[in-house]
Amino acid sequence: MEIDRAVGESCDRRLQTKYRNAVYVIQRAFALYEFEQVAFSFNGGKDSTVLLHLLRAGYYLHKGKSECFQGNLSDSMLNCPIRTIYFESPSAFPEINAFTYETATAYNLQLETIRSDFKSGLEALLKEKPTKAIFLGTRIGDPNAVGQEQFSPSSIGWPPFMRVNPILDWSYRDVWAFILICKVKYCSLYDQGYTSIGSIYDTVPNALLSIVDSSSTTEIFKPAYMLSDGRSERAGRTKKLPLKCDTACLNNGMTNVSQSGSFIASIIVVGDEILFGTAEDKLSAVLCKKLNAIGWQVTRMIVVQNDIDCVAAQVEQQKSTNDMVFLLGGLGPMHSDVSLAGVAKAFGVRLAPDEEFEEYLRLLIGKHCTGDRNEMALLPEGITELMQHSKLPVPLIKCQNVIILAATNVSELETQWDCLLETPSHPLMRLPPFMSKHLGTMLSDVETAQTISKLCLEFPDIYIGCQRKSRVGPLVITFVGKDKTRIDLAAEKLSNSFPAGAFSEADCG
Ligand SMILES: Cc1cc2nc3c(=O)[nH]c(=O)nc-3n(C[C@H](O)[C@H](O)[C@H](O)COP(=O)(O)O)c2cc1C
Ligand SMILES: Nc1ncnc2c1ncn2[C@@H]1O[C@H](COP(=O)(O)OP(=O)(O)OP(=O)(O)O)[C@@H](O)[C@H]1O
Ligand SMILES: [Mg+2]
């Protein structure tokens, strides 16, 4: 078969290894699932073009040569009649659309065009036709590849299928080496300087391929395969406009002080063991107190599973609605340590080796490190700031307005917090602290409820909360705010609304 032959006859040993592994993954998938229950996600991009020809090679090897040759078909037209899905969007480049349809016809792919978003399109597809696995041209540098393996079940919240990523470990160079060695057709945009193709609204030719030609009025670009540094593959993908709350990212992680006179933060704790009830989260409560003491308000404390998508979903949501997000847990070398991958996914960047951080880790755990790459030194690319302090063995990690704390107990958290505040570039502006006052009473909830409701309306700047430690014990009313006089006034008003002695100051630790 021509693809197999071209790679075999090339002198590119690296490509040969990548090719063999990818074809092996494809053959495994064909052996595991019924052919009718697998699909190929094809969009005319370079990665899915490579995958198309690997599928043809894998199918040929899986089926055996004889079954694949149909009559007098030349082997370059050898087909893999796989179900193929294309999510066609009105904002796709016409060249991409044309290439997708031409290629599907040329290779007899059973094309199913879907005109909705990925998730609902896949939901409808799975309802209509049982689909166990879908081949994708995802590569490790893609923002959405974080945490994926060659066989990765679809994410939580997505319809259930296996994502099969045969070229996950292929580099930009490998992709072009394959296309050029196998002499397969590719979308014409890649000859015009496009190196990764999204929509017409967010994709331009890669400026690194621009040819300076003073005699020409139009800008000319070299073809995509001329890009020497694959890390710049997505340089032509313009950033989406920031969401309204993402101003936090533009302003060194700071928005303006909200009307309540404080910054807001949320805390995400990553820990299956907390959700199973086998461990208790003590750190968030301590962190809340620390934040309150510098005048920050905590809007949420969330515990999530050790799952990249769960972490990513929460980080994505919280980072855009809070001035700062603190992440606790899920850091380290274990399979369940997915916090950084979740952060990377939330920001749409990849995890990349960070030499500075690796050096710190080497000093700390050097001799225990195995392998040639330290997985713990992979940090979200382009958005990570290391906050070093002499009392810390490794720096704290900050990704825009998300701070990742590696504390495993209260004492470590206290040290990390103190160091954070002592770091010159720390992003936590000190504001007047929150203060609180607690009143205890043996009056019942029913007797006090109405008066307290009225008090809340009268003192909108003071948080007034009620809690009981037991049904028979005292009711404790808490007043929290930044103005001591106002707190005292609210407490006094409450006491004065009831017979003398009904309330007394309580200590809530
Ligand atoms: C067939 C298919 C399956 C996908 N499955 C998932 C999934 O399980 N989880 C997920 O977060 N995204 C999934 N996606 C979305 C991709 O991660 C990603 O958003 C998409 O390839 C577009 O990349 P872009 O945003 O860079 O254009 C899927 C996309 C396709 C086409
Ligand atoms: N609109 C789509 N329809 C079908 N599959 C898609 C679509 N968009 C993405 N995919 C799948 O996701 C994979 C990764 O997309 P990505 O954009 O990174 O790669 P590509 O389009 O093949 O190449 P390029 O990086 O040059 O754009 C694709 O190879 C394809 O399998
Ligand atoms: Mg693309």
Image (tube, rainbow, N blue to C red):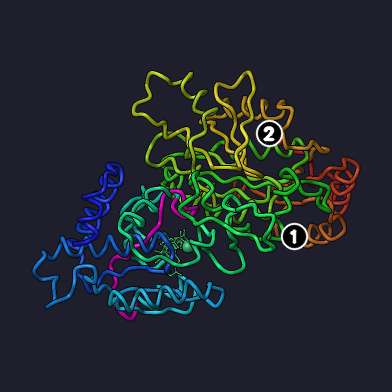
How crowded pointer 1 is (Cα within 10 Å; few <14, some 14-19, many 20+) is rated as few
- Residue 55 shown left or right of residue 465 in the figure: left
Q: Percent position (x, y) of residue 222?
A: 53, 55
- Residue 203 shown left or right of residue 491 in the figure: left
Q: Percent position (x, y) of residue 199?
A: 56, 68
Q: CA distance from mark 1 to mark 2?
A: 24 Å
The quadrant of the rendered image in which ligand 1 is seen is: bottom left
Ligand 1: does it lie within 8 Å of the C-beta at label 2?
no
- Rendered image: mark on residue 449: 1
In percent of the image, x 43 and y 50: which residue is there?
172
In percent of the image, x 18 and y 62: which residue is there?
1
Considering the numbered disc 2 on the image, is that residue within a helix, a strand or a loop? loop
Q: Quadrant of the C terminus?
A: top right
Q: Is residue 382 magenta?
A: no
In percent of the image, x 71 and y 44: which residue is there?
253
Ligand 1: does it lie within 8 Å of the C-beta at label 1?
no
In the image, what residue type sits under mark 1? Ala
| Frontmost residue, 508 versus 102 | 102
| Frontmost residue, 493 versus 249 | 249
| Frontmost residue, 26 versus 496 | 26
Q: Which residue is mark 2?
A: 509
Q: Which residues are magenta?
A: 126-145
In percent of the image, x 15 and y 60: which residue is there?
61
- Residue 388 shown left or right of residue 477 in the figure: left
Q: Residue furthest front?
A: 215
- Rendered image: mark on residue 53: none
Classify residue 452 by image quadrant: bottom right
